[in-house]
Amino acid sequence: MLPKEPGEKEVQELCAGHPQHPGELLALLLEIQEIYHYLPPTAMKEVARYLAVPESQVYAVATFYKALTLKPQGKKIIRICQGTACHLRGSSEVLETIKEVLGIAPGETTTDGCFTLETVNCLGACALAPVVMIGDETHGQMTPERIRKLLQEVST
Amino acid sequence: MSTKLELKVNDNVVTAERGELLLDVLRRAGVLVPTLCEHPGLEGVGSCRLCLVEVNTGRRSQLVASCLYPVEGELTVLTDSPRVNEARRFVLTLLLARYSDVQLIEELARRYGVKPVERLQAEPADCLLCLRCVRACAAQGNGAIATCLRGREKRVSPPFDEPPADCVGCGACAEVCPLGAIKVEEGEGKRRIWGREFTLVHCQSCGEPFATREQFDYLRKQPPDLLVEEELCPRCRKLDQALRISGSTT
């Protein structure tokens, strides 16, 4: 199931935890992102109303930062590194395997709402190349076989 | 401490108030400084970089955007030096690559002898991102539009890319756009802008449409209650007042 759209009341409760100051905008959006894995338009409108900030300003901030997304994300985000070291050690084949197993391309979310696939340029762990992150966990020295097994483990 | 300052501008002496923006000082002195993002009614952002001039505070010389530079002390200003011209021509070269069919940019390029550069192949665009529209909307108190995304994808848009709820259809954004990139359509008593439709209010005297119903609704909500007269357009209202004054004295 995709993360559900928050009700008006839930967002109001979230807002109430922050002072009614325009400077709270990013903090509030990050909190909503953390809980719902994306920013639903209804929530952004509620934030604008609460902070007395124009909706255009909320949309500007929401689209500016990479950490915020307007598209619903899966429960777990799979980040596969496409940096130089990972590329040389065969991250392309690992990526192809993930695409084949989950049936999604980078930037997409599985229909069951479990996984979102993202490619990144470096995860800062080149010694472990090729590197894949599933949620908060880092997995190094990936091969098509190992990622296939890993995906099976985290799916169950 | 005196608030009057003396600046040396291209070998001439010019007086300025402390804190005054350099561009205003130069304009008053009759010095030609090209600008695109600057608008006299709006706060500067310094995004077009055309108003660059060279200032020397005595310690060092640097290029500054004159539209954002407050004069705080004695200065030597050069508006036509080799360094200024090089920087300005560079900016114009880039602008010309992207807005090659925009008359305003072509004219500026011609004035500074800038020619298209073959290897610079930019996607044509109709928006400069000078933010005049965004600033005008914010100045009116609506803030219905802003920039979204970043970098190459950055553009001006209403929130959520939907017809903007906060827009009152005043058309200030289109009015201040230097390239005329914001489309406004009027017909059958309606004004269409940003994908939304507004009802035009006609002057009861001359019959010309001069505002939108939504503009009046917005004004009425402003504290303290503004006296909002809908019946007459600004011109007819002035005429009406003039007639009343002359009528009362005779």
Image (spheres, rainbow, N blue to C red):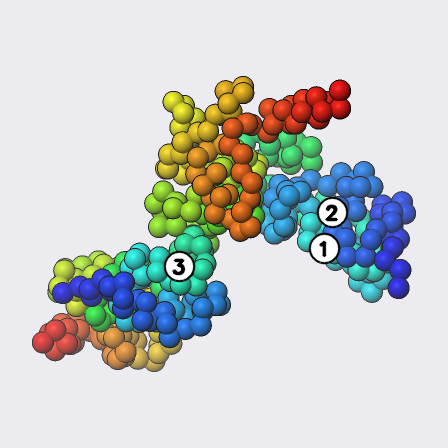
Residue A55 at x, y = what percent? 41, 54
Q: Are marks 1 and 2 in contact (CB under 8 Å)?
A: yes
Q: Which residue is mark 1?
A: B69
Q: Is residue B30 visible?
A: yes
Is A148 drawn above or below residue A50 in the view shown? below
Asked if residue A128 lies left or right of residue B104, the reply is left
What label sits on residue B23 in the rendered view?
2
Quarter assignment of residue A125:
bottom left
Is B132 drawn above or below residue B20 in the view shown? above
Residue type at the position of mark 1? Tyr
Foreground pick, B39 / A65: B39
Residue type at the position of mark 2? Leu
Residue B63 at x, y = what percent? 72, 54
Q: CA distance from mark 1 to mark 2?
A: 8 Å
**Circles 3 and 2 on the same subunit:** no
Query: What residue is drawn where x is 51% and y is 23%?
Result: B204
Task: Tell me the chain of label 1.
Answer: B
Residue type at the position of mark 3? Arg
Q: Which residue is mark 3?
A: A49
Residue A92 at x, y = what percent? 25, 64
Dot 3 falls on a residue whose secondary structure is helix
Quadrant (top left, top right, bottom left, bottom right) of the N terminus of chain A: bottom left
Quarter assignment of residue B36:
top right
Foreground pick, A113 / A89: A113
Dot 1 falls on a residue whose secondary structure is loop
**Circles 1 and 3 on the same subunit:** no
Q: CA distance from mark 3 to mark 2?
A: 38 Å
Is B77 drawn above or below residue A90 in the view shown? above
